[in-house]
Image: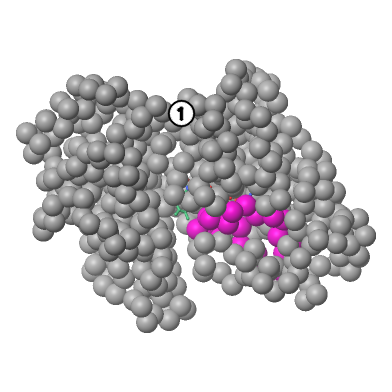
Amino acid sequence: MNSLFPKGFTDQVARDFGPDFLDDEPETRRIYGQDWSGILEPNPSAVAFPRSTEQVARLLSACFEHGVAVVPSGGRTGLSGGACAARGELVLSLVRMNALGPVDPATRTVRVQAGAVTEAVHRHCEALGLTWPVDFASKGSSTVGGNLSTNAGGVRVIRYGNTRAWVQSIELVTPQGEVLELNGELEKNNTGFDLRQLVMGAEGTLGVITSATLKLVPLPKRADVLFFSLTDMEAVIRLFSFARESGLPISAFETLSAACYRESVQFFGMSAPVAELAEAGAYVLLEVEDLEPGDSRLESFLEQVFSRALVLDGVLAQNPREARDLWKLREGIAEAVLHQSLVHQHDVSVPVSKLPEFSARIEAQYARDYPEFKVFIFGHIGDGNLHIFIRAQADAKKEEFLARCKASDSALFQFVKDFKGSVSAEHGIGLLKKPALPYSRSAAEMALMKGIKQAFDPKGILNPGKLI
Ligand SMILES: Cc1cc2nc3c(=O)[nH]c(=O)nc-3n(C[C@H](O)[C@H](O)[C@H](O)COP(=O)(O)OP(=O)(O)OC[C@H]3O[C@@H](n4cnc5c(N)ncnc54)[C@H](O)[C@@H]3O)c2cc1C
């Protein structure tokens, strides 16, 4: 094995765990050493596949003793390099720990292992008319452990909030191999620091999440999906304000730039859902939940949207297939943009009212200073969360492209800071966003974060080099 592990460690693992526990085949190391960003060269020494919390605890205890660096790994759908292993680490994959416990309709909770796929949790709960309201395009591959570790948001944050609102308890294995149950079955618990909340968003730097009790909500009985074309982001915010004032139960309000819309329509070979108008610079997908058929609020909203000229054109999905197609236009953007060439991505947030000015300045800046980049802007308006995907020209050299991106990043991060925003609203800091952290966190905050890391992980074996 071309391993950076200290002598004695691999012997101990071979002795204490089964023969299929550790895999150091080049293909396995390549697959499990990288996330969907595809930017970093994967180079872990091996990948461990535990089946139980007890195995995770024993493994971490051995890693702690031998000083072996560990990268916790879920579905690897993050785009910040958080789950990447490029320096001979041991990847700890939770993929075999995907059990789904019984749904409790009385408490509206379900206990699942951390390797459970997000969408599998949804399907599991559907039968009892319940769902875990954490929902986004990568749900078919992402895992509960990754969702919690990045405090994932998604398309329904506008109605339900982020992941941290939907977790009752977490089972965490510390770097020393101790198993902690954080918060248990309690709804109310005012006994000091809430370590459960601290672990969420920690990107696997404080401990390994092995299972969690998730809070559930009733599955919406129906959803209406609308799609609009508008002139620009100013118009998007006007429509957003009006939709909120109208009292509609909004479950998603997503926007996409004209470049995203065209890319998605073309990539999926769809027919355009709204009229092709040269002045259309932005599009909106609006979803409302649980309106009774014939509820006059939707009809009246649509009448006013057109009579007040708030949009250029619009369509209301007439059946579930049309609704799915409209969602595909929005949720497929990443796939459509990523497939063609190298992409450098940002997931920033700024106050909602500042989105028009912010996105206009970003587009103008890139057009002026980096005309070779193709810029795609889309996101969740209710959260002020924008994705900015920068795509290289088809023949671009990776190193040159990354160097140009790095140069352009400082200006973007400074804009985010000027607008009092966050440099990472979704994928976390990982490795790729580390230079950006000081634009969103003060020196005093970062010193406190380092102190917390030291308290949990004094030898620094968990996800070293990530986040802080
Ligand atoms: C197309 C697309 C759309 C997306 N849309 C959204 C969105 O709308 N909103 C949003 O918030 N995010 C979004 N994401 C990113 C989202 O955060 C991740 O997809 C998901 O939450 C990460 O889960 P994962 O299992 O893939 O984690 P990974 O990528 O495997 O890991 C993410 C981080 O968590 C750590 N980790 C993983 N498992 C554990 C564990 N068991 N214990 C401790 N640490 C662990 C890893 O070390 C890493 O630091 C999107 C991603 C893609 C590709």
Q: Which residue was labeled with disc 1?
A: 219
| 461 versus 295 height, above or below | below
Q: Can residue 166 be seen at all in this image of the molecule? A: no
Which residue is at 41% across, 75% downward? 401
Instruction: Give the left or right position of residue 1, taking residue 467 as reference.
Output: right
Residue 216's image quarter? top right
| Count of numbered labels shown in the rendering | 1
Instruction: Give the left or right position of residue 62, taking residue 451 as reference.
Output: right
Q: Residues within 10 Å of mark 1 (few under 14, many from 20)?
A: some
Q: Amino acid at mark 1?
A: Leu
Of 300 and 308, nearer the camera is 300
| 77 versus 172 height, above or below | below
| 294 versus 388 height, above or below | above
Which residue is at 77% across, 52% downward? 50
Query: Which type of secondary structure does the marked residue at label 1 adopt?
Result: loop
Magenta residues span: 72-93
Tell me residue 201's x, y (percent): 57, 43
Tell me residue 446's x, y (percent): 57, 47
Tell me residue 260's x, y (percent): 29, 58
The stretch drawn in magenta includes residue 73: yes
Of 414 and 335, nearer the camera is 335
Characterize the magenta stretch by its predominant secondary structure: loop
Tell me residue 362's x, y (percent): 28, 58
Instruction: Give the left or right position of residue 205, taking residue 379 as reference.
Output: right
Of 261 and 318, nearer the camera is 318
Of 67 and 317, nearer the camera is 317
The stretch drawn in magenta includes residue 107: no
Which residue is at 86% across, 57% downward? 18
Q: Can residue 52 be seen at all in this image of the molecule? A: yes
| 226 versus 418 height, above or below | above
